[in-house]
Amino acid sequence: MTISVSSPGGGETSLAEAVKNFGISIEDYMLPVHGQIQILSEDGTMLPEDRRGSSPGHQYPVPPDEELLAAYRRLVIGRRVNDQNSALVRQGRLAVYPSSHGQEACQVASALCLRDGDWMFPTYRDAVAVMTRGVDPVDVMTIFRGDWHGGYDPHAHQVGIQSTPLTTQLLHGVGVAHAAKLRGEDTVVLAMCGDGATSEGDFHEALNFAAVFQLPVVFFVQNNQYAISVPLAHQTAAPSLAHKAVGYGMAGERVDGNDIVALLAVLDRAVTLARAGSGPLLVEANTYRMQAHTNADDATRYRNQAEVEAWAAKDPLNRMRHYLRAAGQLTDDVEASFARDAEEVAQHLREGLSGEPEIDPQDLFRYVFTEPTPQLREQAAFLADEIARSADTAPADLAKEH
C-alpha cells in the first residue's frame, strides 16, 4: 500500500510536485474531499470505490489482508488495555485514566504508519498508541499513577512523553521535525491532538511554523466530538477541522476514524508525502469517545444515551472482525490467540502496577537545578529532619549531597 513519491534528482519535492502523479491540481488537493474517506462500511463490508468518499487524486489503495489481520490483533489488545486500565482506576492502582475506548482504530493506525526512526508526539489519551509503538505498557501507565516522571525514555522509542496540557506536544513535534530537516534526516513526525486542541493558540503556531518551513509533520486530529463537555459545534464554524489546513498552506483530509482500513491507507500516504519533502499535512479522523473524559467526568451531563448508542454501532473492532471473518482471515483459533495475547498484556499491567513505587522525597529538590540554590538546600535539609523526627530514627543525611 506504499505510495511512491519521488522528485527530479532525488531531492526535496514540493507538495505540488508530489501530487502531480495523482492527476489533481494543488488547489483541489489541499481541500479535503467531500464527506470523508471510508473504505469499510459499518457492517464490515468493503465499499465500492465510488462510495469511499474519495475523488480523483484522492484514491487510496486497500492494505493487504495480512496487514489488516495484524492491525486487528492490536485493536483487540488496545480494547483490553482500555478496559483493564479503567478497572485499575476503580481499584485505586491508578489515579486517573483517559480511556480511548472506541478510538482504538486511530490509536493503532497512528503507530503502524511510522518507521522505527520516526517520532510520535501523543496526547494524554493516546496510551494505546504509545504501547503499539513498542513502549512497555507498565511504563506507559506510570504517569497515570501520579509518579513524578513520565515512565519511559522518549529517545529510546522516539515517542514524546504524554502530557496533560493541551497542544504543547504539537510544538515539541514541530521542533523535532525542524531539527531533523536541518540535519538532513528523513524523519517524519506524527503530532497527535484532539478536536479541543484545535481551539488552542499552540495549534495555530505549530501548523503555521510547520507550513512556513515545510517540515515533515503529519498533524493527526482525533475528532471525538467533545473537548471534555464542549461539542465541536461550539468550538468552530469551519466545515471540518481538516478545512483548517488550507489556511496554513497544507493539505487536509477527513477520514472515518473507526475504519482502520481507511486510516492505514490515509496515514500511510500522508507519512510518505511528508517523508518525500512535500511539507506538513493534516488528517482529521472522525471518531467518538465512548466513555467519560476521565474517571472524574460525568458524561451524562452533556450527551444523551441515544448518541452514544448510535456511535456504538460504528465500533472499530466489530467492523474489522466482520470483514476479516468474511475474508477467511480470522478463524476461531486465530481470534482465541489474539484474546490470549490481550490477556497477557492485561496481566502484565495488573502485576506491574500492584506494588507501591519507591519514592524518595528528596527528588522534590534533586532535579530542579543543576546547582541547587541555598533555599533549596535549606528546604531539603528541613524535610530530611522532619522525616527523621516523624520516624523517630537517627537522621539520614539525605540533604548532604545538596
Image (cartoon, rainbow, N blue to C red):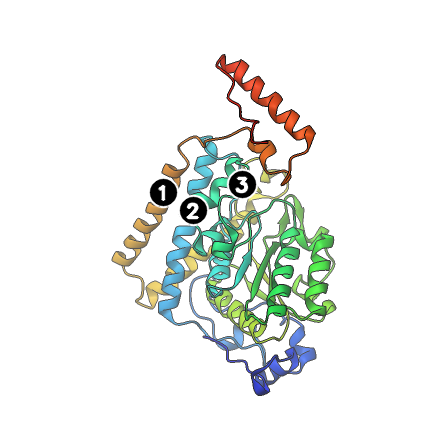
In the depicted structure, whether residue 227 falls above or below residue 60: above
The residue sitting at 32% across, 54% down in the picture is: 338
User: How far apart are labels 1 and 3 at the CA level?
Assistant: 20 Å
Q: Amino acid at mark 3?
A: His
Which one is earlier in the sequence, the residue at label 2 or at label 1? Answer: 2
Q: How many marks?
A: 3
Residue receiving disc 1: 348
Residue receiving disc 3: 149
| Image coordinates for residue 333, horizontal then vertical, percent | 25, 57
User: How far apart are labels 2 and 1 at the CA level?
Assistant: 8 Å
Crowd rating for badge 2 (residues with CA inside 10 Å; few <14, some 14–19, many 20+): many
Question: Are the residues flagged by discs 2 and 1 in contact, CB closer than 8 Å?
Answer: yes
Q: Is residue 314 visible?
A: no
Q: Amino acid at mark 2?
A: Pro
Which one is earlier in the sequence, the residue at label 2 or at label 3? Answer: 2
Which of these two is toward me, 402 or 14? 402
Q: Quadrant of residue 205?
A: bottom right
Classify mark 3: helix, strand or loop. Answer: loop
Residue receiving disc 2: 137
Q: Amino acid at mark 1?
A: His
